[in-house]
Image (tube, rainbow, N blue to C red):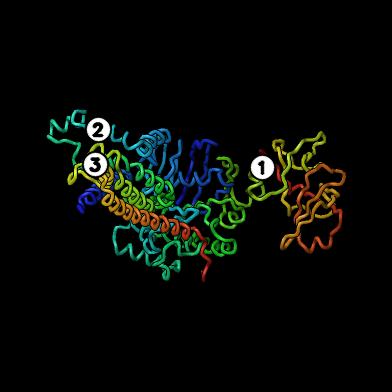
Amino acid sequence: MSLSVEIEKNLGSFHLRAAFEAGDETLALLGASGCGKSMTLKCIAGVERPDRGRIVVDGRTVFDSEQGIDLSPQQRRVGVVFQNYALFPNMTVLQNLRCGARREEDKKKRERAVRQVLERFGLQELTGRYPHQLSGGQQQRVALARVLVSDPQILLLDEPFSALDSHLRFRLEVEMREVIRQFGKTVLLVSHDRDEVFRMARSIAVMDNGRIHRAGPREEVFAQPGTRAGAVLTGCKNISPLERLLDGRVRAVDWGMELEVNDDGRAQYLGIRMHDIRPGGGENSFLCRVVEEIENPFSYTLMLRPLGQEDARPIGWELDKERWRQLRGEQVEISLPRASILLLED
Amino acid sequence: MDWFPLFNSLRIAGLSTGIIFFAGIFAAYYIAKAPRVLKGILDVVLTLPLVLPPTVVGYLLLRLLGPKRPIGAWFLAVFDLKLTMTWWSAIFATTVVIFPLMYRTARGAFESFDETLAYSAQSLGLSNTYIFWRIRMPCCRQGILAGAVLSFARALGEYGATSMIAGYTPGRTATISTTVYQLWRTNDDALALRWVLVNMAISFVVLLAVNLLERRRTGRAERGRQDVPVRGN
């Protein structure tokens, strides 16, 4: 099973231009809300039409503007789980699941498929309930059961956890990973949550303003997000414009720091993740004043400004509680390791 | 007391509600999906009868359907049928007057429908006909019913256009509203009051029904939205 997408669509405020491929794996589209990721998903499902391009699902062309192919959503066999789960509110759980199985013409097989999926998702007790009588987690399970009973060739998940409380999310993520593993075919996950994306998918495509900024294995994307938007989306909080100095070093304009970096000559910004900053001397070390000490449940975040740079925007450093208790003071020396500095294009 | 006006009013209102029920839903469904400019124009045209004085509607209808006017003359010549001054002539008037009520409430109901329900139904392979009758209509049912009841009530009270196109003939075209006017004009105060009370009773029941429908609708919508606490997930 596979998915290959290359589409363009004018959305008024911006131009969506998405191209990516995925095999039997989970690919995540990571992007902020309104970046075009949900629209991409709708184009694949066939409920929105791209202006131009081609979509191939499992070797079957479902959309091709040049050949004039545009299969209806019913013909595409693309399973979608929407953010709000889209359970039919006027139908019980059982009726919802039967809707998923309607493509199967043999009534006996249909009922068997529904029974199997009821059992698999532990929904036997809930068959007579209406969607509004279910918890968020139960709703998600019904939505997954309904989409799987329709035997889709690929599965699209649109922000599947965003409607849930955070304490539930983790548990349902574990369940969802198991479902995906058993499904065994291409899954496209759309999300704005970098942690969720990292845990759920091996491959990640970072999307901003309708454009895919960076795509590849998750480790590579997180290690080198490539663009400023990519760095922000993968959770980098320290980002500053850079200026090149005559001696080959660069100046981080916002932080008032002059740094040695592995400059490729193209970057316009640089970034460093809050936990990649190291205490003490070494590469790119600065003596800083502690502007603010923020206590998190399991760590401290310190806002730091190099001595003598009173106009600079403070840089954030996150470290263990234990470690900070040892170092604590009004001033602290930090090092920004060259290998941890992200060079970013706009 | 001669109950003919009540019977006549009910059949006129019932039939015209039946007509606009389907016409209103049909128009609402397709106009909700129309391009913006067309939607704006059709919206104005179809809502116009709601704001025009009923006498203006009556006048326009007479210009079209009167025995010497284009449509009326044609029917008279071809079918030997006079379109005005019969009991069912009033249906033309009430239909035009109440259509906007049905159309607007149905459109409101369709517009508040969550389109992702239709999207996921399509992806599951359900036909568009199935989706319309088994998902979209049931989800919009309360709004559509409220629109129909409201239209029925308005049709029951229609006076201006009805009196112009159907006139007032006791036992033939008299409705409650035209009867009340005639009784008041002829100083039969006692009987007029009785008809007023009948009319008020009907309106009361109708508005009660609308309110109940509305409350059930919002109640269900709220329940659907709230996050139910998790029990033994």
The local secondary structure at tag 3 comes to helix
With respect to residue B80, does A95 lie above or below? below
> Is residue B199 or residue A266 the one in the foreground?
B199
With respect to residue A178, does B184 lie above or below? above
Disc 3: which residue? B90
Q: Residues within 10 Å of mark 2 (few under 14, many from 20)?
A: many
Say which chain tag 1 marks. A
Query: Contact (CB < 8 A) between labels 3 and 2?
Result: no
Say which amino acid is labelled 2: Leu
Q: Residues within 10 Å of mark 1 (few under 14, many from 20)?
A: many
Disc 1: which residue? A228
Residue B62 tag number:
2
Residue depth check, mark 1 versus mark 3: number of the one nearer the observer? 3
With respect to residue B71, does A252 lie above or below? below
> Residue A324: percent from the left, percent from the top?
80, 60
> Is residue A92 or residue A307 the one in the foreground?
A92
> Residue B180: percent from the left, percent from the top?
28, 46
Q: Is residue A156 left or right of residue B73?
A: right
With respect to residue B209, does A268 lie above or below? above
